Amino acid sequence: MATTEVERRRGHLAALSIAAVVIIVGVPLWWRTTETYRAWLPVAQINELSNLQLQLSADVEVVFARGTVTPEQQKKFPLTQTQDEEHTVDEDTALRYRYETKYRTATIMEEDALNQPTAAEADLSLHTLSESPCGSLVVYVIPESSSLLPQDVDVYVGQRRTALLRIGAQMRVGKTLDQLLAHLEPRTKQVLQVMSFSHTDITAALSDRVRLSPGNKESIADSMRAFKSSPGYEITFSLLNPDPKSHRLHWDIEGAVQTYIQPLLTKLASVANFSIDSQTLYYAMLGVNPRFDSSLGAYTLNSDSLAHVINPVEARLGSNAASSNPVLNFLLYVPDAHHSPLHIHDSKKQEVPSNAFHSPRWGGIMIYNVNSFYGPDAVFPVDLNIDMAKVMGVFLAQLRLLLGVQTSTAPSGFLVAPCSSTGLADWELDRLMWSRTVENVATATTTITSLAQLLDQIGNIVINDNIAEQVSSAVTSLQLAVAELEAGNLRFALQYSKEAILASERAFFDPSLLHLLYFPDDQKFAIYIPLFLPMCVPILLSLLKIVSDARQKRKEKQAKKD
Amino acid sequence: MAAHRCSHSALLLILCSSWVFSVAGSQETTPTGDHHAYVVDNPQTVTETAEQTAEQPAVVEEERRWEATEVEEATPDEVATDKQDTSAPDTVVHSSVPPPKDDFQEELVIRPLHSGDIYASFQFRTLWETDFLRGNKVSHYRLFPKSLGQVISKFSVRELHISFTQGYWRTMQWGQPFLPSPPGAELWVWFQDSVTDVDGTWKELTNVLSGIFCASLNFIDSTNTVQPSASFKPLGVGNETDHRFLRYATLPREIVCTENLTPWKKLLPCGSKAGLAVLLKSEKLFHSSFHSQAVHIRPVCKDWQCTTTSWELRQTLNVVFDLHTPGQGKREWSLFKMFSRTLTEACPLASSSKIYIDITDDPQGEQFEVSPATHLLSQAMVLGDRRTFSVYDLTQQITFGTVRSLNLLIRWKSSEGDMLRPLLHAERYVAGYGLQTGEIHTLMYNNHPYRSFPVLLLESVPWYLRLYIHTLTVTSKGKDNKPSYIHYEPSKDRLRPHLLEMLVQLPPNSVTEVTVQFERALLKWTEYTPDPNHGFYVGSSVISSLVPSIVAMNTNSTREQPLFSSFFPCKEESSYFMRVYTEPLLVNLPTPDFSMPYNVICLTCTVVAVGYGSLYNLLTRSFQIEEPSPGLAKRIANIIRKMRGVPPL
C-alpha cells in the first residue's frame, strides 16, 4: 500500500513538472518563434492627433490714413488686439481662429501712395513699399472724401494682400477711438472673410475628417469640384480630332501654355508641383450621338448626356506612365465636318456660351466648332489654326476651379481688383494655402489614425521599422504643421503638412503591410493541432486526475474527522 | 479598411458656378446673362473686362455631375497683348503651315510562302524630330504616343526594343523573317550614359512597360536579365557601346494575346480606325501559326551627314497564316480571308501607305496570280537578296478602283517551286536522361556553298541549370572548332543567370554543334511555378551574324526605301546583318510533392506525440501487479452458476 502511494506521488510530481516545463519553456518558446514583428509606434501621440484642435492665426494690420483719426485718438491706439473665434466642428475637431490686429497710422510714403489717382495704382505702389508676408493682410482706412474709390464702393480688394477701406460718413469727427474701432470692425471682418480664410472654406477642407451635414448644397458642390490636395498634378491638354480626313488642325499649345498657363502655375508652385503635356488624338469620338436641332441648324448635346461623353475618350487618353499624381484632363473637341456646329445646351435648353463644361475632379471639355471657317465648297482636308487665346481662356477658368481657387462671392460694396497677368491674386493664393494646409492636416491625421486603428485591430500585420519611421515622421510633421498654423507661418505650415501627407500615405500604402494579412486562424489550428493535441491531452488529463485525487483525499480526511 | 478615403459620392453640384468679381452696385449694371468667353485683344479694356463680368444667378441644380463652364474672366490683357503681335488670332484657314516635325508611314508586306502559307508583315513608323533628353521636358505630342514619350524621357532610354511573339518561326520552311523575334517576350534597352542606377531604372522601366502593354514584364528581375557584351549593339545612332548600359531579358513563357494587341494598336496615330491598321482584328490574327508584334524605339539620322537625329518609333506586326487552318485547303488568299476586312482608305496622317507583295519567286506569274494586278513594281534589297514587289499605293484613289475597296487576291496556280535555303539557321535541344544532369545542344547550319563566316552565339541560361563550362565543346565537321572569343559570366543562385557569348567561325556548308552539360538544381518550394510539372523554360539562344550577301547591299540608311528593308543598319555592301533565334527549351526539374510540408508536419507531430505519449505514461503512471483476470469460459461458467445459485468457481 505504501509503495503504491509513493508511486502515485511520483507520478503526480512527474506530471506536474512536465506541465511546468511546457508552460515555462514551451509556451514562451512557441510564442517567441511565431510572433509577428511589430515595431513601436507613437500610439499616444497618434491618439492625441485624433483629437484635432486647430488654431489658425492671421496677422492684420489696420493703417489709418491722414484725415481718419485725430491726433488724440492716435495716441490711444492699442498695440495689438487679439480676437478669438471658436468653432466646434464635431466632437473631436475644434477650430479656433485668431486675428491679431495691429493699428498704426500711415507713413508718409504710404500717404503718397494713397494719393494716386486710381485704386489699382495705389495698390501697386503700396505693394512696392512693403511686402507683407504670406497669410497676413494690410487694411488701409482712407477718409470718406478720398477719390480713390467710386461713390458706391466702400472696400477695394487689391491684387496683393492689401485692401482699402473707406471710413463711413457718420464717423467724421468727435467720436471716441473705441467707437471708431467698433465701427470699423464689421467691415474688417468682411475683408478678412474675403481675403483670408472663411469658416465655410475651412470646414469644407475638413470634409475628409468630418462628415458634412447635407445642409448647404452649394458649398458641398464647391468643395467637391476641386481636386483633392496632392503634392503634384499632371495637366494634360488633348486635342481630339475625330475627322483628320477633313480637318488638319494646328494648335500652338507650347506657346499657349507658356503664355496663359505657366504664370498661374509658377504662382502656385508653393502649393504643388505641376507638369504639363499635350497630345493630339485622332479618331477620338464622343460617347453620345449629338441630336440635330433643325430650328437652330446645329447639333446639340444635352446636359443629361454630357455624363456619357467622356468614357470612350478616356480609354484613349492614357494614364501618365511616369508618375502617380492625379491628372487634370483638358480636352478640346473639334466636331467632325458632318456634325458641326455642335453646341452644348444646359438644362434650360439654353446654349452654353462658352461651349464648354467641366467634370469635377476630372477636367474640362471644350467644343470648338470650325465649320464657319471654311465655305461649303472647301477642298478637304482644310488646314485650320486654332485660336488658342479663346481656348485657353476657358481652360484657365476651369483650371482655377479644379485647383480649388476659392470663388467666394464678395459682399455688396466691395470692389475686387481684376486678375493680374498671373491669373491669381496674392490673397487668393493665401486662401488656397489656408484651405490646402487644413485639408492636408485633416487628411494626414485621418490616415495616420486609421492606420493605427487598423494595426491595432489586426494583429497579423507585420510593422517593419521603415513603416514605424514613416509614421513617426508623419506625426512629427503634423505636430509641426499644427504649431506653425498656430504661429501664423502659413508657408511653413503648408510645407510641413505636405510632408506629413506624403509620409502618412507612404506608410499606409506600404505593400509590406499586406504580407501576412491573410493568415486565418483555422490554418494555424490545422498546423498546430497535430502536435498540440496529443501533447496537451495527457497533461490535462493527469492534471485533472491530480485535482480529483486531491479532492477525494480531502473528503476522506473530512469524513475521518467527522 | 480604408473607409476614411472613400470619396464622398455626392453628386450635388451646381450648374452654374458663379465665380464673379463683384461689381459695386450690381443692381445698376443690368445682368445681361450672357457670358462671354472673353478673349481680349484690345488693350484698353483692362478694367472693363472685369466690370463686365456680370454675374449670373447661381442656379442650384438637383443631382448633376456636369457643369457648364462659365468663363467670365478673360485672359488678362497684358498677357494677350504681349504675345498677340499677330493681328488675326481667330481660327483661319491656314495658308502657310510649318512643316510638321513628325512623320508617319505605314506599310504591309505580303509574301506567299512555298508551303502555301502566307506571311504578312505590318510596319508602322513614326519619326519625330525632337530631343527627349534635353533639360526642358518634351511634352507636346502629336503623332508620337504620349505614354512612350514619357517613358523615354523619364527613364533616359536611348533605345528600346520589345517584342511579343506567339509561336516559333520555322526558318527552314518559311525563310527569313523581316524582323526576327524569339517566342515569348523579349526586351532589350540601352540607357543613356547619364543613368547612374541602371538596375533600378531597369526594374522600374519593366514595371511601367508591363502596365503599358498589359504583359507580365514585371517578372523580369535580376535572375533573367543579362548584359550581353557583343550580341546586342545599338541599332540607332550613337557610339556609346559600353554594355553597362544595356539590359536584355526574355520571358519565354509569356503568352501573347488580344490584351497585348489592344494597347499596341492604341499607340498608332490612327488607332485601328483607318489605314492598314483596320486589318488588325485580333480574332483572325491569333488564329494563325505565328504572331509577333514589336515596338522599336531608337534615334536615327535625319539626313545623310547625320547632322540632326530624330526619334524613330517602329511598330511591327508579323503574322503567318496557315494554309490548312481555314479548313478548305484551297491555295487561295485574299485580304478578306486573312483579316476579314478589306481596305478602303489610307490613314490620313500617313505620308506614305503602301502594300507590297513579294513576287520574286514568280516573275512570270506562273505560280500564283495577284489580282487586282498592278504594274507598279519595286525592287528592294532584303536580307542579302534582291527581291521584286508589286506595290499598291493606298494614298492614290485609283488603287481602290470603282468599288472603293481593295481586296487583294492571291491564287496559286501550281504548288511546285523551290525555296532558296536560308544561309544560316539554328536549332537547339536538350539531351540526357534522368533528373540530375543533362546536356544542351545547339546546332548552327551554314548553308553557304563556299563562304565561311563568323557568328556570335549568346546563351542565357537560368541559374537553376548549373552549366559545367568545362564540358563546353564546339565541333564542326567532326573537328574541334575553337571559338575566337568567349565571354562567360557564371550564375549566382537566385541572383543572376549564366551568360555565355562566343564568336564562332562557321565553315562553309557545315553544321557546328555547341554542347554544354548542366546539372539541375533543387529549388525552394516557393520558387516553383504553379504548374511545376510542365517544366521550366530556357530562353532562345541568339545568333547574330554578318552573312555574306549575294547582291550589293544598300549602305545609305537615309535613302528612301521600303520600311521592311531598312531596319538593321548596313555598314558594308558585301554582307548583311542577320539574327536567328533558336527554340526555347523546356526542361524538367526535380519536383517535389507539394502537399509534403503539411504531411511532414503531421507525420513528425505524430511521431513526436507517440514517443512523447509513451514516455509521459512511463513517467506518470504507477504500475502494480494485477491479478490475472479469469478466462472467458470461467466467467460464463460463473454467471451460469450464479443464476443457478451455486457458489462460483
Image (spheres, coloured by chain):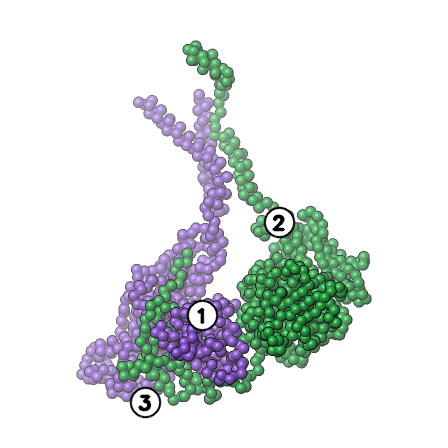
Res. B298 image quadrant: bottom right
Residue nearer the viewer, A153 or A41: A153
Q: Is residue B33 above or below residue B442?
A: below
For the C terminus of chain A, the image quarter is top left
Does residue B599 appear anywhere in the picture? Answer: yes
Asked whether, in this view, residue B503 is left or right of residue A316, the answer is right
Residue appearing at x 55%, y 83% in the figure? B98
Q: Which residue is mark 1?
A: A288
Residue neighbourhood size for the residue with mark 2, other residues' Cα within 10 Å, grouped as few (<14), some (14–19), many (≥20): some
Residue appearing at x 69%, y 67% in the figure? B411
Residue nearer the viewer, B98 or B589: B98
Residue appearing at x 60%, y 63% in the figure? B284
User: For residue A100, which numbered disc appears in the image?
Assistant: none
User: For residue B533, which numbered disc appears in the image?
Assistant: 2
Q: Label 2 is found on which chain of the structure?
A: B
Pick out the residue farthest to the left. Answer: A174
Residue nearer the viewer, A389 or A517: A389
Q: Which residue is mark 3?
A: A117
Q: Amino acid at mark 2?
A: Asn
Q: Amino acid at mark 1?
A: Val
Q: Is residue A524 above or below residue B141?
A: above
Q: Are marks 3 and 2 on the same chain?
A: no
Foreground: disc 3 or disc 2: 2
Residue A160 in the image: state x and y as whole percent.
36, 80
Write down which chain is painted purple.
A
Asked whether, in this view, residue B72 is left or right of residue B351, the answer is left
Pick out the residue farthest to the top. Answer: B646
SS for dot 1: loop
Residue B143 in the image: state x and y as whole percent.
56, 75
Q: How many marks?
A: 3
